[in-house]
Image (cartoon, rainbow, N blue to C red):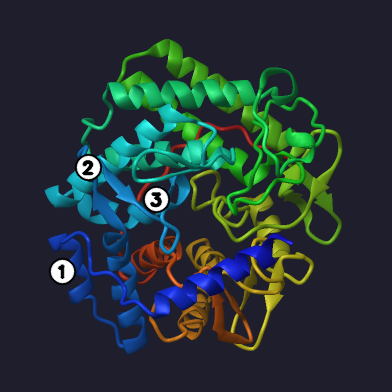
Amino acid sequence: MHWTHNLIRALAVTLIMALLPRTAASLELHSIQQAAANFQSSDAHLQEMFRAALLDTGKLAEYAPDGTAYVKTGDIPAEWLRDASAQSRPYLFFAKTDPEVRGLLRAIIERMAKYLQIDPYANAFTSDYRVWEQKFELDSLAYPVMLAWSYWKTTGDTSIFDDNFAKALDKILATMQREQDHPRSSQYQHKELQDGKGRPVGYTGMIWTGFRPSDDACYYNYLIPSEMMAVVALGDISEIEKTVFRNLIKAHAATALRDEVQRGIQTYGLVYVPKYGYVYAYEVDGLGHAILTDDANVPSLLSAPYIGYTSASDRYYQNTRAFLLSQDNPSYYTGKVARGIGSYHTPDRWVWPLALVMEGLTATSASEKQDVINQLLASDPGDHLLHESFDPDDPAHYTRVDFGWPNALFSEFVLTSFSGVNEIPMGDTSDLEFRSE
């Protein structure tokens, strides 16, 4: 089982880290530190956890000799395109008014553009630009685009869209187009996939992906949450190409691919479940097979409104959400302290803070948001940080002593849901066509 290997690794890292003090902040960002210091709450525990979460990315980011910025995931000395994009996102709240933060975000985006040119099939890299893992995850192509688009819309700064970034967009678009017809067009293989290339798939217009955002191999290779994120990112690419680069041909190509993926999702990704109605499947193969579940890692089905794909009030999302947050979902677990979605990547029946935070971010009621906060505070093992997963009966047992992503997402949740800060935009999908009954 994959989770046993990961648990052993996590326990080893925990023992090593316990013997060492956590490194001091690599970066001194005045507005971030001030926001952390000034945050006040009647709940002292929430106050401490928010401050630790907001400062966490600054402790994991550092400038490289080439002027770019490297963001490691935490206790693993590598940068994931997905994780680093998510870890950087809360700092967008401060980028408009703080040139230091803008400079850091530009440096992060510049490095990601270089990664994508080196190998668009890789999901993680080292500080010296070597490939750490070559697990093709569709979301790893989408995340940097969405970060750059959000940076642009938040700050108005187009300086990130240089020749380096343009070349990265070319790589992204070409890779997505190639993987639309994986069996005939792709040379990508990985030892963790069945027969190296994955199980058989039918042509759907969607984009084949080898691995989930958890870094685990897909069972069926059209991963609906990642397809959703690709739709948003392709819309972002189209707007960037049209508005900034003035390249109507590339803009049209991105829009055409986006629309094909969207039709594929609406045609193959919705499955009728008598108790819930039509719900989005987690994975499909275009040959009539589907998996009905979710994974804590984002993109997830639960995260569809957060990533900008659909609204939280959409009927199919509501049906899906009701299924996901129920005992009918095989990845939904309950315990004495918390209840939520877990992952095949970690021990059975352990809950992930990432999924709890996402439940809060997509909740439409104040009571559900507060309930999520209460569970997250209860998951604190004593260091005031969120971790990868934990035993919902005993949060003292957890994986990954140092994991930046959930802490960044938690700080975003607190700012937007409890501090009145406006959400950072992800993308514009208002012109998409959705299935209607």
Query: Is 420 left, or right, of 138 in this rendering?
Result: left
Q: Which residue occupies 66% across, 43% down? A: 224
Give the image quarter of residue 149: top left
Q: Nearer the viewer, mark 2 or mark 1?
A: 1
Q: Which amino acid type is marked by label 2?
A: Thr
* Residue at left offset 70%, top offset 25%: 182
Residue at (70%, 31%) from the top-left corner?
264
Badge 2 is on which residue?
A: 155
Image location of residue 333, percent across then percent down: 70, 74
Neighbours of disc 2 within 10 Å: few (<14), some (14-19), many (20+): some
Give coordinates of residue 327: x percent, y percent: 76, 72
Q: Is residue 262 left or right of residue 127?
A: right
The secondary structure type at the circle numbered 3 is: helix
Q: Name the N-terminal-most of marks 3 and 2.
A: 3
Residue ID at (45%, 59%): 76
In the rendered image, is residue 365 in sight?
A: no
Disc 1 marks a residue whose amino acid type is: Gln
In the image shown, does 177 or 326 lie closer to the viewer? Answer: 177
* Element carrying mark 2: helix
Q: Which residue is mark 3?
A: 84
* Labels 2 and 1 touching (C-beta < 8 A): no
Q: Position of residue 323 (x, y in %)?
A: 73, 62
- Give me the disc on residue 34: 1
Distance from label 3 to label 2 (Cα)? 19 Å
Q: Quadrant of the C terminus?
A: top right
Q: Is residue 324 among the parts visible in the rendering?
A: yes
Callout 3 amino acid: Ala
Of callouts 1 and 3, which one flags the residue occurring earlier in the amino acid sequence? 1
